[in-house]
Image (cartoon, rainbow, N blue to C red):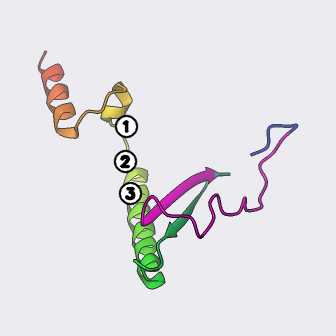
Amino acid sequence: MNTGAMSMSGLSAGASMSPQAERAYALDIAGSVMDGKLTLVVTYDKQEYRESTMQALLANYKKQLLSIVDHCMQQTETELTPSDVGSKPMSLDTFEKLLTRLNDL
């Protein structure tokens, strides 16, 4: 991202915590989007998970994410979701019931 006087570095910021620090979670996934590209950083407890397990998890995540993108790209009309109409959490079931009630008016 370039805003003129400043821009994002393409270099890694390095570890945000010491590898010897006690982990709050056995698995931590952080993501960011820069220049239209999703980047995930996965840190995990190597005593609890094997690298092959994490590779399989990320491969499946990518497959499912691409499936969602493909589904969305095939849509010809937009659809409202609960996050489009309010800031308070609402289940999809509750949202659909409200839409039905509004359409019946």
Left or right for 94, reference 35: left
Q: CA distance from mark 3 to mark 1?
A: 15 Å
Left or right for 91, reference 79: left
As for residue 23 lying within the magenta part, the answer is yes
* Quarter assignment of residue 105: top left
Callout 2: SS: loop
Callout 3: SS: helix
Tell me which residue sits at (44%, 80%) in the image: 47
Residue contact at pointers 1 and 2, CB within 8 angstroms: yes
Disc 2: CA contacts within 10 A as few (<14), some (14-19) or many (>=20): few
Instruction: List x then y, in percent, for residue 60.
Output: 39, 72
Give, as a three-letter code, the residue at label 3: Ile
Residue designated by label 3: 68
Instruction: List x then y, in percent, for residue 93.
Output: 16, 38
Is residue 11 positioned above or below 89 on the image? below
Going from N to C along the chain, the mark reached first, 3 or 1, is 3
Looking at the rendered image, the disc whose residue lies closer to the viewer, 3 or 1, is 3
Residue contact at pointers 3 and 1, CB within 8 angstroms: no
Residue contact at pointers 2 and 3, CB within 8 angstroms: no
Disc 3: CA contacts within 10 A as few (<14), some (14-19) or many (>=20): few
Give, as a three-letter code, the residue at label 2: Gln
Is residue 54 positioned above or below 9 on the image? below
Tell me which residue sits at (48%, 63%) in the image: 23
